[in-house]
Amino acid sequence: MTGLAGQVVSFPGRGAQQVGFERAELMRILDLYGRMVAAGEWRDYAMDFDKHAATFAAFRRAAERPQARVEKRPALRSKQGMWTLFGEHGQVLKRGHDLANVLAPMERRLLKAVD
């Protein structure tokens, strides 16, 4: 045990039980959500976390299907990118490796809503 004093040793075992958003990612998503609320586009949101993906869904009204859904799926990181933006009817609007680029269509929509 000499040399281990003061070091953190990870406990071997199971991997993560669920995928989540990092603080910077969530701040970026919530910043867009706040601006869309201020523009009158969105009124509610929901988040879902499971072992394969983390999802943020934004709603016009709580009783409707989400107007937009952002999904983080780390298993696709080396393929088409772990970020996906889905539209209201489930169509893929954008995929990519960078969250800012994936949120760009919603940012453009916000600019149109403000005009």
Image (cartoon, grey):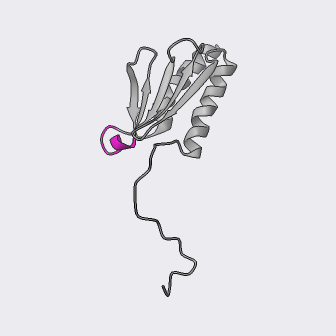
Toward the front, the furthest residue is 13
**For residue 20, above or below residue 29:** below
Q: Dividing the image into 4 quarters, which one contains the C terminus?
A: top right
Q: Assess whether residue 49 is covered by the magenta stretch.
A: no
Q: Assess whether residue 75 is covered by the magenta stretch.
A: yes
**Quarter of the view holding residue 58:** top right
Q: Position of residue 55 (x, y in %)?
A: 48, 32
**Quarter of the view holding residue 13:** bottom left
Magenta part of the protein: which range?
A: 74-80
**Quarter of the view holding residue 111:** top right
Q: Nearer the viewer, residue 93 or 10?
A: 10
**For residue 90, above or below residue 33:** above
Q: Position of residue 30 (x, y in %)?
A: 62, 32
37 relative position to 74: left or right = right
Toward the right, the furthest residue is 38
Q: Residue at x 63, y 32 (%)?
A: 31
Q: Position of residue 27 (x, y in %)?
A: 61, 39
Q: Residue at x 51, y 18 (%)?
A: 66
Toward the bottom, the furthest residue is 2
Q: How many marks?
A: 0
Q: Residue at x 39, y 39 (%)?
A: 52
66 relative position to 91: left or right = right
**For residue 12, above or below residue 19:** below
Q: Position of residue 107 (x, y in %)?
A: 55, 25
Q: Residue at x 39, y 36 (%)?
A: 96
